[in-house]
Image (cartoon, coloured by chain):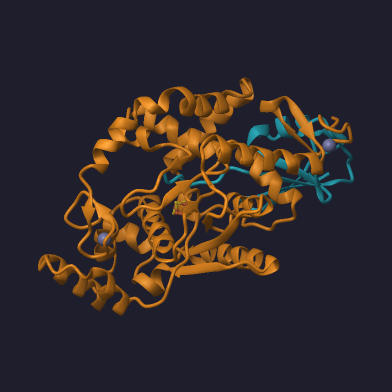
Amino acid sequence: MKVVLRNPRREVDVSGPTTVDALLARLELNPESVLVICGDTLVTRDAQLADADVVEIRPVISGGATP
Amino acid sequence: MKCRRCRAPAVVDVRRHNAAFCRECFLRHVREQVRRAIDDHDMLQPGDRVLVAISGGKDSLAAWDVLRELGYDADGLYLGLGIGSYSDESSRYAHEYASRHGLTLHSVDLARDYGYDVPGAAVATRRAPCGACGLSKRHLFNEVALERGYDAVATGHNLDDEAAVLLGNVLRWETAYLGRQHPVLPAAEGFVRKIKPLVRLGERETAAYCVLSRIDYIVEECPMAAGNRHLGYKELLNELEDRSPGSKAAFLLGYFERAHSRFAGDAASERAHLRPCPECGAPTTGDICAFCSLRARATVGDEAAVELVARRTARGRSSGRSARRATAPAPPGAPTGAG
Ligand code: SF4
Ligand SMILES: [Zn+2]
Ligand SMILES: [Zn+2]
């Protein structure tokens, strides 16, 4: 499947099928720091991703904290 | 996974609540958390006019959207920071949201209205960009809200932002900062009320809210954020959260409930020494407020800055407000604290 990563924007190919959890583990990403978007909707961590899917992994952490 | 509330297929899971939600129920969950934060901390009264600090990012746009959904009279304020294409793009997202919903978005541009920008200020003052940026935001949000008669300034600070700041404050035992770290700072002489309605929501939730509400926001990170201390704290806290879901909320919300009041005195004694800045009228403990001092240093070389520095040395005549308006016409606008 095609996996789109952001900041900076890039694409990697990952062979499927797999679950969201397994995909994040494979990419060494903390599930707490990202959202996973498949097609045009969010998916939960147990969701199955097919080899033909296009998946965006979107970071949710924003930077400069100004108290 | 199934939605905890209606058993439909879920689209987002929130481990902290050991729950997953469908789209509708998740949007409701977010509104309920904001409602609860507002009520628990007496953030707003019916009829209050709110000025939301809009950065074009997920948190500020979510805050604006939810406040409006809850029926509040909320306008936006966008602050142009002059951070290259990042600022251009974030401005576009902010204005697009406003025009799509027919909302009022005030706009202040640091370069146009005050003669400096964030990267320039960072160089001139040898401060980290986020320091100069945060100082400018705090000052201008407050100033615009006072000038335009808003009852409160709302920022998009979320649970993760606040937990990271709390960790930093605790690591150094910054007791005055701890005393000020609260979801609502009441109005005081020269200060409008400040509220943080997203304080019960993690940033994964605010991002999910935007995606599910079809709110377009700037996903790219501010280029000045790299290496920011709070980003490191957020990563550490998320590792902890991954091992033990609920840690961040227990840390932050427990602080508000059980520990904040112990530090409130430290913040109050600082406020006791405030007096109006001779340049702009904002309360300060110094001879001139931190914003005017930043502005003077950041704009050295251009005429307005020279005049400002000259006036500052010939201190005493205090019509700073109208004098500044003469050189820096036109009104307001500004963004949120985080990123
Ligand atoms: S990361 Fe945030 S606080 Fe820092 S310079 Fe960028 S917008 Fe300002
Ligand atoms: Zn549901
Ligand atoms: Zn001042």
The residue located at (62%, 51%) in the rendering is B67
- Which quadrant does ligand 2 occupy? top right
Q: In which quarter of the image is residue B6?
A: top right
Q: Residue furthest front?
A: B46
Measured from the top left, where is residue B1 in percent x and y?
A: 84, 30
**Residue B303 placement, left or right of B248:** left
Q: How many numbered markers are drawn?
A: 0
Left or right relative to B170: residue B202: right
**Point 20% across, 44% down: residue:** B273
Q: Which residue is drawn at 34% across and 76% down?
A: B328
Residue B114, placed above or below residue A17: below
Q: Tell me if I can see residue B16 in this picture.
A: yes
State whether residue B302 appears in this view: no
* Coordinates of residue B187 in the picture (x, y in percent): 39, 48
Q: Position of residue B20 (x, y in %)?
A: 78, 31
Q: Colour of chain A?
A: cyan
Image side of residue B328 versus residue A29, left or right: left
Relative to B88, residue B326 above or below: below
* Between A10 and B115, the one nearer to me in the picture: B115
* Quarter occupied by residue B110: bottom left
Q: According to the rendering, which colour does chain B have?
A: orange
Quadrant hosting residue B160:
top right
Q: Position of residue B302 (x, y in %)?
A: 26, 76
